[in-house]
Image (cartoon, rainbow, N blue to C red):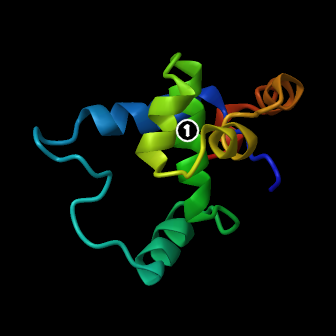
Amino acid sequence: MPERPIREQIMTELSNHVATLPDGQEKLFSDKFSPKKWERVRKTADLPDLKFHDLRKTFASLLAQKGVSTAVTQRLLEHSSPQLTNDVYTNVDPVLRQAVDLVPAADWV
């Protein structure tokens, strides 16, 4: 699976959004999320290549960067093993991260 690092500023915005969710809401979206709805979101945000699964990887990467254990991340993602979590989600190459950080955030949004 290819890596898709996301700029720190964009991850911060996503974190800020999560912080504004109502008490008791444990999901990013309050209603049922469909492929059609995701397509509309991508078009509105002008992110035609962003896959919904990329958000899952971002979530796992954010947890890893915050020091959350692989075991906890594994449980949150409902993986069969911690190795799967490490291999697929928390292996963002620092060189790739550095390269992506060179692109101004305004060019992303």
Give percent across and percent down for residue 41.
Answer: 46, 67
Residue 101 image-quadrant placement: top right
Whether residue 29 sits left or right of residue 53 in the image: it is: left
Please say whether residue 10 is visible from this viewpoint. Answer: no
Q: Foreground: 9 or 29? A: 29
Please say whether residue 32 is visible from this viewpoint. Answer: yes
Q: Name the residue that disc number 1 marks.
A: 60
Kindly state the secondary structure of the residue where label 1 is placed: helix
Q: Which residue lies at the image location 58% right of the left edge and 42% below the top edge?
A: 58
Q: Which residue lies at the image location 63% right of the left edge and 42% below the top edge?
A: 85
Q: Residue placed farthest to the left in the image? A: 23
Q: Which amino acid does label 1 sit on?
A: Ala
Q: Foreground: 90 or 42? A: 90
Q: Residues within 10 Å of mark 1 (few under 14, many from 20)?
A: many
Q: In this view, does 49 lie above or below 21?
A: below
Give percent across and percent down for residue 50.
Answer: 64, 61
Q: Residue placed farthest to the front in the image? A: 81
Q: Which residue lies at the image location 73% right of the left edge and 31% below the top edge?
A: 104
Quadrant holding the N terminus:
bottom right
Q: Residue placed farthest to the bottom in the image? A: 36
Give percent across and percent down for residue 70.
Answer: 56, 29
Q: Which residue lies at the image location 62% right of the left edge and 64% below the top edge?
A: 51
Q: In this view, does 109 lie above or below 19?
A: below
Q: Foreground: 89 or 42? A: 89
Whether residue 53 sits left or right of residue 87 in the image: it is: left
Whether residue 59 sits left or right of residue 90 in the image: it is: left
Q: In this view, does 30 lie above or below 72?
A: below
Count of numbered circles on the image = 1
Q: In this view, does 56 lie above or below 87?
A: below
Give percent across and percent down for residue 48.
Answer: 66, 69
